[in-house]
Amino acid sequence: MTAPDSQMVKQYLQQLQQHICKALEQLDGSATFMEDAWERPLGGGGKSKVLVDGAVFEQAGVNFSHVTGDAMPGSATAHRPELAGRSFEAMGVSLVIHPHNPYVPTTHANVRFFIARKPDADPVWWFGGGFDLTPYYPYLEDVQQWHRQAQSLCQPFGEEVYPKYKKWCDEYFYLPHRQETRGVGGLFFDDLNEGGFEQCFAFMQAVGNGFIEQYRPIVEKRKDTPYGERERQFQLYRRGRYVEFNLVYDRGTLFGLQTGGRTESILMSMPPLVRWQYSYQPVAGTPEADLYQNYLKPRDWLAV
């Protein structure tokens, strides 16, 4: 069985960041990514790449990070006591894309690798990641295509993989205080170390490589759809759900802040503009009501 190779994972993640940024620049056709390399005083660093006020994307952030430490935070060892007394490496690519046009969905993706070591003991390691789609004015054909491609990339790894990680995504990206999903889901996996390092790494790469191929056709179809102030205001209101989830529930945000990560990079997922409205209720029969009634709940999108 192949031993975990963190350097090989790091090289892949750096290449993935470059590939996704290039693809997004081509889709936008106007703006380019600014690059911001940073170092973490406690160990490690990364590179944040952010595109602002493009023709298609209002803001897109694609972040690579590789942080190291001599000890895990107490919050982590409370849940995983086997990590106590170990040094660690955590690396990943995480991205969030906020388009201008309300008919183009917001999306998020990340892939990550964690390994903890101590002398005279086997390392503890796992992969995690996934992607999800958050439409404001959803098209059923887009949602179905998103899930068909997710199922397709999971297929070589077993029939049970897509339904398992689709369900996990629905459960993870759920706001209990709103009693709604953040969007229409996708895939989410964590603590993946079964089947050996090579197979787990291959699955993580399939997710990382598959993301942009799923998102690109949706952007191309919807980016020129006409919209007005009503749609824009609803988009800004729904962006508030992103803020609520990321600051209250997201594991990556919490881990980054607890381990002394770079705040600007951790919070680059926040939308540039957002609004809240007291006691908002969509009007029955409107496209806004359609989102609430038919899309913000777990569904078998392949059977709709």
Image (cartoon, rainbow, N blue to C red):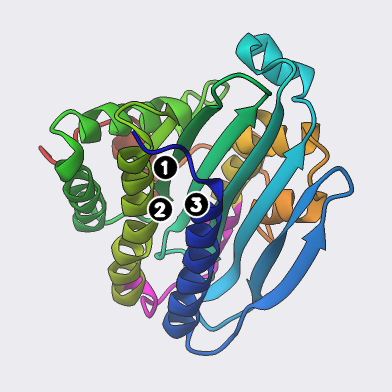
Q: What residue does disc 2 label?
A: 135
Q: Position of residue 169 (x, y in %)?
A: 39, 33
Q: Are marks 2 and 3 in contact (CB under 8 Å)?
A: no
Magenta segment main secondary structure: helix
SS for tag 3?
Answer: helix
Name the residue at 32% across, 48% down: 202
Q: Do we see residue 270 in this rendering?
A: no
Residue numbers of the magenta segment: 222-236
Task: Count the numbered circles shown.
Answer: 3
Q: What residue does disc 1 label?
A: 183
In which quadrant of the rendered view does residue 90 lie? top right
Name the residue at 60% across, 84% down: 32
Q: Going from the N terminus, do you reach mark 2 or mark 3 first?
A: 3
Q: Are marks 2 and 1 in contact (CB under 8 Å)?
A: yes
**Mark toward the viewer: 2 or 3:** 3
Label 3 Cα neighbours within 10 Å, binned few <14 / some 14-19 / many ≥20: some
- The amino acid beneath tag 3 is Val
Q: What residue does disc 3 label?
A: 9
Label 1 Cα neighbours within 10 Å, binned few <14 / some 14-19 / many ≥20: many
- The amino acid beneath tag 2 is Pro
**Mark toward the viewer: 1 or 3:** 3
Q: Do we see residue 214 in this rendering?
A: yes
